[in-house]
Image: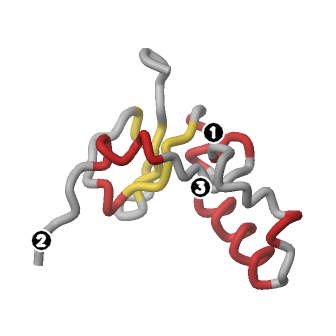
Amino acid sequence: MLGKKKYYYNIKTHQVEEGRQSSWTELMGPYSTREAAEHALDLARERTQAWDAGEQGQAGLDQEAGPEQGGAGLDDTLAPDWGTPPSD
């Protein structure tokens, strides 16, 4: 995976970032393409609606798949890249 570009959607600026440039608290992703990152909010909305409708198994909510495969993109190997949450 090294060397592959990753894209993030910044929920504060509403812009796509190439590579993680902002705090993890402001980002959705990573996504494998700029286009996928541009549609991060649409994808999140679709998944939320499907979850609310009880269609979890049919909504591409597989937590093992990354966002580009329709999954939630939860990958423990990415946690170190996210940085440390701010302390209160």
Q: From mark 2 to mark 1, how far is it between C-alphas?
A: 33 Å
Mark sitting earlier along the chain (2/1): 1
Q: Which mark is residue 40?
A: 3
Mark sitting earlier along the chain (3/2): 3
User: Residue 85 location in percent, x, y?
Assistant: 22, 63
The quarter of the picture where residue 77 lies is top left
Mark 3 Cα shell of 10 Å, populated few (<14), some (14-19), many (≥20):
many
Kind of residue at badge 2? Ser
Residue that lies at the very extreme toward the top in this rendered image: 3
Which residue in the protein does label 1 denote? 35
Mark sitting earlier along the chain (1/3): 1
User: Residue 58 location in percent, x, y?
Assistant: 88, 64
**Left or right: where does residue 13 sit relative to residue 62?**
left
Q: Nearer the viewer, residue 68 or 78?
A: 78
Q: Are marks 1 and 3 in contact (CB under 8 Å)?
A: no
Disc 3 is placed on an element classified as: helix
Mark 1 Cα shell of 10 Å, populated few (<14), some (14-19), many (≥20):
few
Which residue in the protein does label 2 denote? 87
Q: Nearer the viewer, residue 38 or 27?
A: 27
User: Residue 61 location in percent, x, y?
Assistant: 73, 60
Residue at 50 percent across and 21 percent down: it is: 1
Residue at 45 percent across and 47 percent down: it is: 76
Q: Are marks 2 and 1 in contact (CB under 8 Å)?
A: no
Residue at 64 percent across and 47 percent down: it is: 67
Q: Which tag is nearer the camera, tag 3 or tag 2?
A: 2
Kind of residue at badge 3? Ala
Q: Which tag is nearer the camera, tag 2 or tag 1?
A: 2
Mark 2 Cα shell of 10 Å, populated few (<14), some (14-19), many (≥20):
few
Quarter of the figure with the C terminus? bottom left
